[in-house]
Image: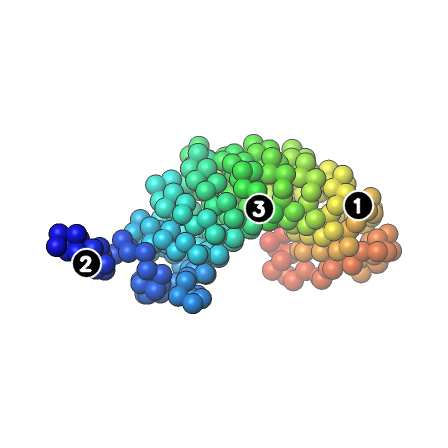
Amino acid sequence: MRIASLLLLLALPIPGFLQADDAAVAETLRALGGEVTLTEGTATKVVFRDCSKLGDAEFRGIGQLRGLKVLTLYGQCHGLTDATLPHLAPLTALEELSTDGIRVSDAGLKALTALVSLKSAAFFHTSFGMPGFDGTGFGALRALPKLERLTVAGISMGDAGFAALAEIEQLRDFSTWHTYQTAEGNRSIARLKNLRSLRLGQRLPRHVDGAPAPPSLTDASLRDFLGLSDLETLTLMEGRFTPEALAALKALPHLKKLNLQVAPLTPEQLDRVKAALPGVAVEWKPLTDEEAKKLELYLKQ
C-alpha cells in the first residue's frame, strides 16, 4: 500500500517546472511570450524575442526539453548567467543556439560544452562591459565536435578572445563585427583554415573606457585572409577598400561570392573589382545617407 501511494504521488503534477512534461513547459513559456514548436508532443524549437523575464525557473524548464533542436534567446537575456547556464546542460540534442545579452564569465562559458550536438551558435552583446570578461572563454567551444557555424558580435572582447576562438578548428562559417579586435585579431581569425564562409565587420570605435581604437578592417587587413584557401564566401562590412586591395582576393582559389556591405565605391571602381575577379559574384549597393553617416562614425579615430 505504501508503494502504491508513493507511485501515485510521483504521478501527480508538481507546481512550476519540476515535471518533465513538454506540453506543460511549453504552455508556461508561451505565457511569457515564447514561441514553442511541438512535434508529436516533443518541444523541438523555442524562440524568445524578449527573454528579459526569464529567470532560474524558466531556464530549468527549458533544460527539461530534452528533444529541443533550436533555442533562440533574444532581447536582453540577462537572466542567463553562470548560475543558470548549467540548467541547459541536459539539452544534448540541441543543434542551434542563439543568444543576446547573456551575462556570463569566461569560465562560465564552459557550461556550453555539454551541448554535444550543437552545430550553430550565435552570441550577441554577451557580457558587454562586464569586468574581467575578454571572450577567452569561447575557446571552450573547441570541445563541441559538430560545431561548424559561429557568430560573435557586439561584444567587448579583444584580441585574446579571438586567439581563443582560433582554436575551434572545426568551424566552417564564422561571423564577427562590433568588437574590440585589432589587426592581431584578424590574424587569429585567419588561422581558421577550414572556413568556407567568413563575415567580417568593423570594430567598435571606442572601448567601454572611452579609449579610441584604430579601424580593424582596412586594405591592409585583407592580406591577412589570403591564406584561407577553402573560402567560398566573403562578406566585408563597414570599411573603405580600394579596388586594388579587393582585386588581391583573386589569391583565394575557391572564392565564389564577395559581398560588400556599407562599403563606399564608385561604379567605375566596382567595375574594376569585378574585372579583377571574373569568377566571383560581387554584390554591392550604394550607401544610403544614414549608412554613410554611420560609417563615418565607425571609421573615426
In screen coordinates, is 81 left or right of 236? Answer: left
Residue 113 vertical position relative to residue 98 in the rendered view, above or below: above
Residue drawn where x is 74% and y is 42% of the image? 228
Closest to the observer, 45 or 249? 45
Closest to the observer, 99 or 183? 99
Q: Residue furthest left?
A: 1
Please rate how many residues cluster around mark 2, counting C-alpha atoms within 10 Å: few if below 14, some from 14 to 19, many from 20.
Answer: few
How far apart are the two marked residues, 2 and 1, measured between alpha carbons?
66 Å
Q: Amino acid at mark 1?
A: Leu
Please rate how many residues cluster around mark 1, counting C-alpha atoms within 10 Å: few if below 14, some from 14 to 19, many from 20.
Answer: some
Q: Which residue matches tag 3?
A: 146
Q: Which residue matches tag 1?
A: 252
Residue 209 vertical position relative to residue 276 in the rendered view, above or below: above
Question: Which one is earlier in the sequence, the residue at label 3 or at label 2?
Answer: 2
Closest to the observer, 154 or 194? 194
In the rendered image, residue 69, in percent from the top left (x then y), is placed at 48, 56
Q: Which residue matches tag 2?
A: 8
Q: How is the image coloured?
A: rainbow
Question: Which one is earlier in the sequence, the residue at label 3 or at label 1?
Answer: 3
Q: State whether residue 159 appears in this view.
A: no
Q: Quadrant of the C terminus?
A: top right
Camera-near label (3 vs 1) is: 3
Q: Are marks 2 and 1 in contact (CB under 8 Å)?
A: no
Q: Amino acid at mark 2?
A: Leu
In screen coordinates, is 193 left or right of 62? Answer: right
Q: Are marks 3 and 2 in contact (CB under 8 Å)?
A: no
In the rendered image, residue 1, in percent from the top left (x then y), is placed at 12, 55
Query: Regarding mark 3 in the picture, which secondary structure is present there?
Result: loop
Closest to the observer, 272 or 279? 279
